Image (cartoon, rainbow, N blue to C red):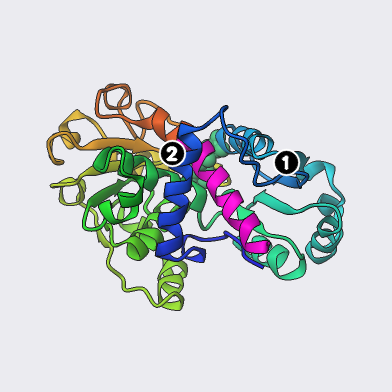
Amino acid sequence: MRHFLKETDLTVAETAQVFAAAAALKASRGKSDALALARQSWGLMFFKKSTRTRVSFQVGVHELGGMPVMLNADDLQISRGETVADTARVLSRYLHGMVIRCHEHSLLEEFARCGTMPIVNALSDFLHPCQFMTDMFTLAERFSPGRPEQFAASLKGKKVAFLGDTACNMANSFVLGGAALGVEIALAGPAGYAPGAEIRAQLKKDGLPETFTFSTDPAVAVKGADMVYTDVWVSMGMEAEKAERLRTMQPYQVNAKLMGLAKPGAYFMHCLPAHPGEEVSAEVLEGKQSIIFDQAENRLHVQKAILAHLAAARG
Ligand code: CP
Ligand code: NVA
């Protein structure tokens, strides 16, 4: 059974296929009869808040001919102590696959191990692979316009600067996915927020080199970057640390001065939701280098391609 819990659950060749399929789905949206999930029901289970992921997966499953079954984890017996193993085994008897947003990454792994259906990571505390795939697709659209078969290759050797909370799930996804795709990942954040042991262990497990760099100087990371990325300073679940994070991450705000150190015409990206005035200035967020709404739209197309890929792999 194939799952998509982390970036490296797809080979580079499969990532290239998913990008090409996503471009085709984007071009044919509303016109195509290709229904990869026809007569299927997919569960979408959320333990955390979501706007983009929730709606784009719901619409995506529907557009592929399937029925999305929206599950708020709070309404399920799992929130009253039913085991993950039993939940996975029971839901596998009804559903053809599940998309899950949760806290501990291990819950996704247990679901995948105990159930008999594909599981997709819709964000865990550790990784956000659907967002990373979409971000790379969105960037490749700019580097290789109209040539989706070149998308994956066009990312090789490009420099991405990631600023702020460089120990969060998005940063981890860039570290792992960047190493797999040959993208140079330069991170900058406060000393206590460097990529941790868990993501380094994952690189090792996947046989990937530690190609990322970490600096406490934002100028070092941004210098010559093709794209500058940031994420919220207070991820879901980190609210108790809010005051400390807002204070220590201040020097890493992506603003016009910092963008000026990147390559001329460099793109600004953010997974959203954004907090203008915190991790990014309103000027950069709304400026002409910002491609945040292309990113948000592309979640739909890329996730549809991932779902179709998993469904086809299942046969
Ligand atoms: N970027 C992202 O995953 O957004 P949501 O939390 O709104 O789903
Ligand atoms: N790092 C953020 C990403 C939100 C899409 C969080 O986990 O809250």
**Number of on-image labels:** 2
Q: Which SS class for mark 2?
A: loop
Task: Give residue 250's mark.
Answer: none
Q: Which residue is mark 2?
A: 271
Q: Is residue 126 above or below residue 162?
A: below
Q: Is residue 217 left or right of residue 163?
A: left
Front-lying residue, 28 or 183: 28
Front-lying residue, 154 or 28: 28
The C terminus: image quadrant:
bottom right
Few, some or many C-alpha atoms within 10 Å of disc 2 (few <14, some 14-19, many ≥20)? many
Q: Which residue is mark 1?
A: 66
Gap in Å between the C-alphas at discs 2 and 1? Answer: 26 Å
Q: Is mark 2 within 8 Å of ligand 1?
A: yes
The three-letter amino acid code for the residue at tag 2 is Cys
Q: Main secondary structure of the magenta part?
A: helix
Residue 234: % across, % down: 47, 41
Q: Is residue 289 left or right of residue 138?
A: left
The N terminus: image quadrant:
bottom right
**Which quadrant of the picture is home to ligand 1?**
top right
Query: Which of the two discs, 2 and 1, labels the residue nearer the N terminus?
Result: 1
Few, some or many C-alpha atoms within 10 Å of disc 1 (few <14, some 14-19, many ≥20)? many
Q: Residue at x 30, y 57 (%)?
A: 191
Q: Which residues are magenta?
A: 298-315
Residue 72: name its quadrant. top right
Q: Is residue 261 left or right of residue 29?
A: left
Residue 80: % across, % down: 86, 52
Q: Is residue 303 magenta?
A: yes
